[in-house]
Image: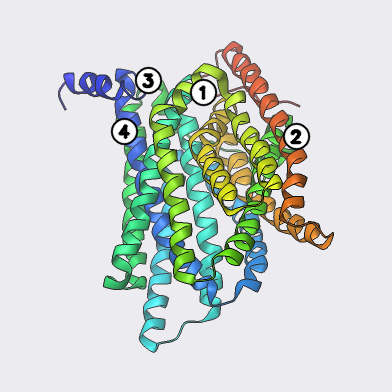
Amino acid sequence: MTRDSPRSAARLLGRIVDVREEEVRALTLSCAYFFFLLSSYFILRPIRDDMAVAGGVSELKWLFLGTLTATLIANPLFSALVARFTVRRFITISYRVFLVNLLVFYVIARAAAGEGTESAWLGRTFYVWTSVFNLFVVSVFWGFMADVFSTEQGKRLFGFIGVGGTLGAIAGGAITVSLAQVIGRANLLLVSAVLLEVALQFARNVRGGWLGGSASKVLESRIGGGVTSGIKHVFGSSYLLGICAYMLFFTIGSTLLYFQQAELVGAQITDRAVRTAFLAKIDLGVNTLTVLTQLFLTGRIMKSIGVGWTLGLLPAVSIVGFLAFGLGTTLTAFVVFQIVRRASEFALSRPAREVLYTVVTREDKYKAKSFIDTFVYRGGDQIGAWTYGGLALLGLGMSGIAFAAVPMAMVWLAVALWLGRRQIELGRASHVGAGAPPTESVRIGS
């Protein structure tokens, strides 16, 4: 690459995203890293869902519980890696463990295909494993991004980095659709494993190819701390608990909508092929709106109105959407609400939520964040499932459940705005801290 290449790339990208010349390499490598990471997962997701069908829909609540339990077990193991190894080493070890798991599933799946049988327990295990895989690898990715980029850079660049993930999700789904019947489902696991390894290589290049000097030494250092320190820090910090609350409100609302979707679409579209195509169109609408927003709006919105108000857009959309759906529980109203809400999560809420972690300590960027992104996230799913069942037992229909979700979304909005104010305060405190390096921050207090 010539000396003028970064400058030319910066001018080209500058038409879409506010990127500096010295940030171009990190931005493009981060996008590529996220692209291959999500393409690897989105090859697995349809396989996971198909395997889960073997156990019946009634088993879904137990699969949710199994995933929640697995994330609780996996968190201390991941924290032990973070405590003992450098960032380079624990990211490599984590991803390679998942890669080896994929190869094991491949061998088992090939053997099952040869015998013409597939164990129900294989489907259940793969469902739980894939759910844990998705949460952990994405959490590690965003923790790494919060470690590499500053708050100011995150506001400008995280939305565009998300474009890589969205395109990767589309590519992964397209690979499964086009190759599933050609090479077989088991061989798709190998394709996913290769893409995961490619993602890992891009992760290594983001760090080694861009940062230098003291910053590079910090990233190559061992983070240390205890195995359970991430969990302890979460419960000892009002800021991290606030992020937990934001996550819980989001996942509870998403689960309520998931069950409403199953009920509404299942009742109005009885043909299975038509139903599959209909849901695929919703996904297409979500991905299209997400990419357009990430490309042209996310960075500008976050820079203009700040992290708190950007976080608040998703709760605001939820308030309006639940009210509208409660007033008229039509399929059209639901589809519009679902597309706008999901696109708002991927394009606005997720990047803003990751900026929150740029002001916490490096230990919390990986350990506390991993606990929140996995166990708290799945805990919200479980609470949402119980909530929907409880409200249904009370005699509330889809309209009543939608109205019941509105007060929750209002509290969620208040939490978002509080987090935005607290993030600014902690950002200022970290700059005032006694000569702390750029990737460190003050310990968060209550």
Position in image of residue 49 (x %, y %): 50, 66
Who's the residue at 44% across and 67% down the image? Answer: 47
Considering the image in quadrants, where does the C terminus appear? top right
User: Foreground residue, 67 or 292?
Assistant: 292
**Residue drawn at point x = 57 percent, y = 27 percent:** 310
| 369 over 137 or under it: above or below | above
Residue type at the position of mark 3: Asp
Mark 3 is surrounded, within 10 Å at the Cα level, by few (under 14), some (14 to 19) or many (20 or more) other residues, namely: some
Quadrant containing the N terminus is top left
**Comparing labels 3 and 4, the label whose residue is closer to the camera:** 3
Task: Identify the amino acid type marked 4.
Answer: Thr
Mark 2 or 3: in front is: 2
Q: If you read the primary sequence from the N terminus, does the residue marked by circle 1 or circle 2 appear first? A: 1
Residue indicated by mark 1: 302
Return the disc, 4 or 1, that comes first in the chain's sequence.
Answer: 4
Tag 4, which secondary structure?
helix
- Counting residues from the N terminus, which is met first, the one under dot 2 or under dot 3? 3
- Residue 61 tag number: none
